[in-house]
Image (tube, rainbow, N blue to C red):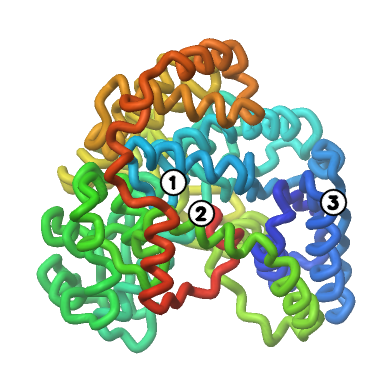
Amino acid sequence: MKVAVIGAGSVGFTRKLVRDIIKVEALRDTEFALHDISAANLDMVAQIVRKDIAANRLPTRVSTSTERRAALAGARYVICCVRIGGLDAFHHDIEIPLRYGVDQCVGDTICAGGLMYGMRTVPEILAFCRDIREVAEPGAWFLNYANPMAMNSWAAIEHGGVANTVGLCHGVQHGWRQIAEVLGATDPHELEYICAGINHQTWYVDLRWNGRRIDCRELLEAFERHPQYSQEEKVRIDVLRRFGVYSTESNGHLSEYLPWYRKRPDEIPSWIDLTNWINGETGGYLRYCTEQRNWFETDFPRWLGEAGAPLEHYQRSDEHCSHIIEALETGKSYRGHFNVRNAGLVTNLAADCIVESPGTVDRFGLNMVAGITLPMACAATCSVTVNVQRMALKAAVEGDLDMLRLAMLHDPLIGAVCNPEEVWQMVDELLVAQAQWLPQFAHAIPDARDRMGRARPSAKASAGAARLSVRSVAELREARAPRDAAHSPSELAG
């Protein structure tokens, strides 16, 4: 069996996925074909996984290539972990919208950053799919971790022609452990749950603790009395209070998908906590990734030193990837929450959209649960995002400038802050700044540059003058004794 990893230079995340797979005895006779545009990163991850393999005397094989088709040739599973444009493009995603008053914490799903991320990534996803169809094993599975998850998975299924596409994310698992903690469960597995929605806007619609259903009131009271989460998850708790359902996503994520919490600079501090970037810090993920950009000087030597330990001491993670492959290869049933085309899985969301919903994998494939109905408030929030995603996907595939503008205009947070002319000008700035990663918009770049030259400066930054800057928030954060969680940037894929 051959498993190809595109974007394998996300060393920490690739290392985790490989170890998860080789932890399963039945999957150890596997060839891993690692692909990245960075030969240096490929060399680092190969050193680590080869050391693990050699020390445990496994038959597993590892190859590396900067040529994608060579890595994909004959692959049965293709895992995607890419970030197109890297930190250079990410800076534009956050800093240009901030000048217009669009305040983002992460910027990888919707809002201005997520939409531009989609413009850069969708064409590459389609190129990956073309190669999968042409050189991978027939019926190969495309396991996508790359954001924006819904748009990328939608592109692969509808335009890429790879039917066995599944989008994977760990937000559901993280929220599950958090809920178990606030309720006082001694083991998270005491808590059973059903989630449904769309990626990064998924909702715990049914919670059972040792078989007893947990209602909104009990969960709300548990979060409100928790000494840590009552301060770090103010947006999620407020949405729980008003919607009656808890969201899978962090405070920082959720706050930028809604029109209510990040639109007034004087109110933003009351909704976020600066002890950890993911709680809502302005440009928090950008700052964190920028500070960690030299990870190879510290993390790589540590990872390489740790590699080679006996696999019996390694605890397999709850990332879905290895469990899906094990289920398909061995028939061992696995239940999880997966991103797939809706087609009736969630009754009150559009049939063509990508939903995140429960399903089971076994030797016969992926079997999703159908007929889940979201609470009306959750469905309304998700439907707004679905329509933005649909317009953005069309823009990304066709290079349609008007559709990109309309997607931005209909985004909840952008629409809460910007007037239409500001949206049009912001799109021009983003296109010009990111032209090198947007080949489908090459025809529109000269006119956008010309419009920028003629735009009135006061209009270009009308809303941004009073807004918090990434630097000012970072400085405030330093004054508050930060304690970021020990995550590699690559671990936050999906």
- Callout 2 amino acid: Leu
Label 1 sits on residue: 107
Vertical placement of residue 479 versus 373, above or below = below
User: Looking at the image, which is closer to me, 327 or 150?
Assistant: 150
- Callout 3 amino acid: Ala
Tell me the mark number nearer the camera, choosing from 1 and 2: 2
Q: Quadrant of residue 303?
A: bottom right
Res 137 seen here = yes
- What numbered label is drawn on residue 286? 2
User: Looking at the image, which is closer to me, 280 or 186?
Assistant: 280
Circle 3 Cα neighbour tier, 10 Å, few/some/many (<14 / 14–19 / ≥20): few
Dot 1 or dot 2, earlier in sequence: 1
Dot 1 or dot 3, earlier in sequence: 3
Q: Looking at the image, do the residues carrying marks 1 and 3 touch, with CB atoms under 8 Å apart?
A: no
User: Looking at the image, which is closer to me, 382 or 20?
Assistant: 382
Q: Position of residue 228 (x, y in %)?
A: 29, 79
Quadrant including the N terminus:
bottom right
Q: Is residue 135 left or right of residue 398?
A: right
- What numbered label is drawn on residue 39? 3
**Residue at 77% across, 85% down:** 310
Q: Position of residue 397 (x, y in %)?
A: 55, 21
**Residue at 34% across, 59% down:** 280
- Callout 1 amino acid: Gly
Label 3, label 2: how far apart the Cα atoms are: 24 Å
Res 373 seen here = no
Q: Looking at the image, do the residues carrying marks 1 and 2 touch, with CB atoms under 8 Å apart?
A: yes
User: Looking at the image, which is closer to me, 195 or 83?
Assistant: 83
Q: Quadrant of residue 53?
A: bottom right
